[in-house]
Structure formats: C-alpha cells, structure tokens
Image: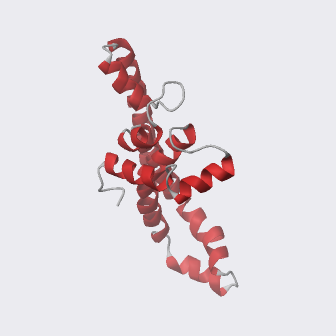
Amino acid sequence: MPIVLPPTVLGYYVLVAIGRRSGVGHAIEAIFGAPIVFTRAGAVVAATVGALPLVVKSGRAALEAVDGTLVGAARTLGAGPLRALLTVQLPLAGRGVLAAVMLAFARSLGDFGVTLMVAGDIPGETQTASLALYDAIQEHRDGAALGLALALTAIGVTMLYAVNKLASPDAR
C-alpha cells in the first residue's frame, strides 16, 4: 500500500498509528519518556515507512534470482532454512539487496508528505533537505533553493549510478 497511497495519506495513517492518542504512541512514550511524532525519530520512521516497499520488492527480486539449486545443495548438506538463507542465498543476493537499500535511501531523501505529516518541518530538528528546499522557495531564497536542489540532484545521480553498477552483471 505505501507505494500507491498519496504520501500525505500514508503520513496520516502513520501519524494515527504512532501518535500520542494511539496504543503504540502511548507505549513509545512510556518506554522512551517522550512521543515519537515531531521528533528526529519520527522523521526516520516516516522515511522508512515510505521507502520500505522499495527494499521489499527489490530485495525479494534479488533473493528470488539466486539459483535454487545452490540453496538446495546447502540444505542437503545439513543447513537449515535460516542457515541456508544467511550463508548462501543472502550473500549471493547481497548486491541486489544493497541496491534495494540504496534506492530506498535515495527515495527517503526526497520524501516530503509522510515526513511533513509525522515529523513536521521544525528547522534544526525535523526539517529534511526536501522540506528545507520547499521553505527556501516559499521564502524567495533562490540561492539556498538552488544549492539544496543541486546537492539533492548530486546525491540522487550518485546513488543511481551506484545502484546501476551494483545491478550490472559485468560488475560481478
């Protein structure tokens, strides 16, 4: 669902799920002594929820691409399912899983809606680069907006290049 829901709708659901009025929110506040919404931790949760589908879909594809006979061979040699996953399948799918995590990280850098709903836009506390870019544009600080846009573009291009190198069959 996080892939197809509008980010603000997803943010609303996350806010309701972990907000101060929810059971989860009460538990978090009891354990950590403070609410999670409108904090840095809330920004991390928001970005993670928004980006997690990329990790799941891409990581699953990488794991499924591993030759099943190799996993089967490990199983016939006495490895249990978990050991076969950790010692055979995951190392062989590692490049694809790493690429999935990098895509998710790049996606989370650009997150706007979920982060704004859950963490807010508190400068110096929960303001992300995307939110700072939006604020700079709203405040007609064109130089700051351009700097942020160029930095985010450079990070995005670098991440995309690295993901493509990891996914390339020649890189193995």
Residue in view at x 36 percent, y 56 percent: 2
Q: Nearer the viewer, residue 23 or 166?
A: 23
Tell me the colour scheme of the image.
secondary structure
Q: Position of residue 74 (x, y in %)?
A: 64, 80
Residue 143's image quarter?
top left
Quadrant that contains the N terminus: bottom left
Coordinates of residue 103 in the picture (x, y in percent): 44, 47
The answer to whether 83 appears left or right of 4 in the picture is right
Residue under the image location 39 percent in, 44 percent down: 114
Residue in the foreground of this view, choosing between 143 and 117: 117
Q: Looking at the image, is 154 positioned above or below residue 83?
A: above
- Asked if residue 169 shows in the view, the reply is no
Left or right position of 115 against 98: left
Quadrant of residue 156 in the image? top left
Residue at the spot x=66%, y=69% of the render? 87
- Residue that lies at the very extreme toward the bottom in this rendered image: 76
